[in-house]
Image (cartoon, rainbow, N blue to C red):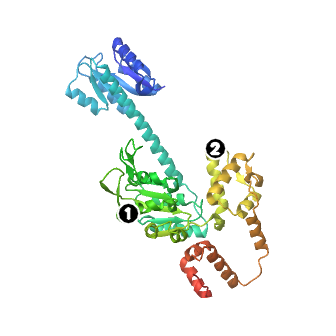
Amino acid sequence: MPQILIIDDRRDIRLSLRMLLEDAHLNGDSYQVLEADNPQSAQPLLQKNNILLIILDMNFTLDTTSGEEGLAFLRWLQQAKFNVATIALTAWSNTDLVVKAMQLGASDFIEKPWKNKQLLHAVEQQLALNQLQQQNAKLKQQLSQQNNQHNREYQWQSPCMLQLLKQIKAVAHTDVNILLTGDNGTGKSELAHFIHQHSARKNNDLISVNMGAISENLFESEMFGHKKGAFTDAKANRIGRFELAENGTLFLDEIANIPLSQQAKILRVLENGEYEVLGSSRTQQSNVRLISATNADFVKLISKELFREDLYYRLNTIELLVPPLRTRQLDIIPLAEFFMEKFCHKYQLNKKAFSDNAKQALQSYHWPGNIRELSHLAERAILLSENHLIELHNLNIAPTSTTQTNFSAAQLLPFMTLEQAEINLIKQALSKTAQHIPQAAQLLGLSKASMYRRIEKYGLATN
């Protein structure tokens, strides 16, 4: 139970304060009131108890007017690094004493005889401030842990991901808008964090927004904020995501889900940085770095007039395709082992390992859910395995028709020259990506320039 410490040499004063505080139920909570008749006896109480607030008389046995004993106790609090709010209390106050007490860390100063309402208000203020400081400390710790977690993320090994990270590092330090495309679960959100951490804005906030989770009628309020009374349910001011991300990075996930009716408002911010808070006529200027992500086909959306072409070109100054996990064979086992170590630590389990059969199954599986599916599978397997070795049955990977077809195709693959095999692979990659040459190059682990050279070399027609 949180505690308040009263330090005063008069028993009647301590009793009056105890009764006042215990009857008040400050901030709706009950507090335990502790007493000390001098600063020396208060010191061990501070070391043994969770004291949130001290009410300190400034004068004891030395004299009744100087406040030197109270000031000495405040100095001791500072030296001992006790971060405890202190309200100084004295019948003999003067400006010099008040200034000295405040310089030594006193939070407030009240004269005796006190007014109950004034004293309770001061106590409530200090307790509320203490609670806010604790919440801020927790938030900072959580953010620090999140940043550390992202700093400890898996280091990619597959050629296509190493090439992608090389591209990202080349543009991360700039403020250029980046559009991350690729299947669901490929790790686009993690890459957005990576870009932010390698940008000039890394010391400011990264604000993430799932655009698919924002209803059309609340879009402006969520993105730009609103003033109290701007609409029926606007009972308080709200800060929008653009303002929250000021001087930092704004990550818009599932960007293709922006309602068509709202796309012009996002376009305006991207073009000139201007927007208005809902219910205000004052134009504000935004200073954010924008990263977007989607698994949608923008070509189809634009052709069906579901997405503005001009907005698309504002978003994709740099467009980067995040390849699916099935094309990152070198990453599958190391990534599974990374998740295994992560979840063993999370659940306080001894380190486990995958059996050879389990590894073979992980390599053979086609991973429709990509990295997200692998993470969930590893977490489940770790919790269900009964010993240190994760076996095939712990993975619960059911053979699929796609997997079986892939095996059959591999087993029946006819012999051909390497040149013909390369031509067939290029044709398959182009067909799979709807003739999108950069995406086809990513699937094959080639650079865009290398892909164009091979297309020209073999005389392959593209749309």
Disc 1 from disc 2: Cα separation? 47 Å
Q: Is residue 197 visible?
A: no
Left or right: where 23 falls relative to 354: left
User: Which residue is more in the foreground, 337 or 136?
Assistant: 136
Residue extending furthest toward the left: 95
Left or right of residue 205, residue 343 in this image: right
Task: Decide which of tag 1 and tag 2 comes sooner along the chain.
Answer: 1
Q: Report the quarter where the C terminus lies.
A: bottom right
Residue to which mark 1 is pinned: 268
Label 1 environment density (alpha carbons within 10 Å; few <14, some 14–19, many ≥20): few
Residue type at numbered disc 1: Arg
For mark 2, what is the residue?
347
Q: Is residue 172 above or below residue 145?
A: below
Nearest the eye: 74 or 435: 435
Q: Amino acid at mark 2?
A: Tyr
At x 38% / y 34%, what residue is drawn? 129
Secondary structure type for disc 2:
loop
Circles 1 and 2, Cβ within 8 Å, touching? The answer is: no
- Residue in the picture at 66% in, 81% down: 422
Specify the quadrant of the image occupied by residue 132.
top left
Q: Position of residue 337 (x, y in %)?
A: 66, 55
**Other-residue count near label 2 (Cα within 10 Å), few / some / many at <14 / 14–19 / ≥20:** few
Of the two numbered discs 1 and 2 in the rendering, the one whose residue sits closer to the viewer:
1
Image coords of residue 100 (percent x, y): 25, 30
* Local SS, label 1: helix
Res 195 label: none
User: Could you tell me which residue is drawn at 54 percent across and 54 percent down?
Assistant: 152
| Residue 10, position as x, y percentages in the image | 33, 13
- Residue 252 position within the rendered picture, expressed as x and y whole percent measured from the top left: 48, 58
**Up/down of 82 relative to 44, above or below:** below
Horizontally, residue 23 falls left or right of residue 449, namely left
Q: Quadrant of residue 54?
A: top left
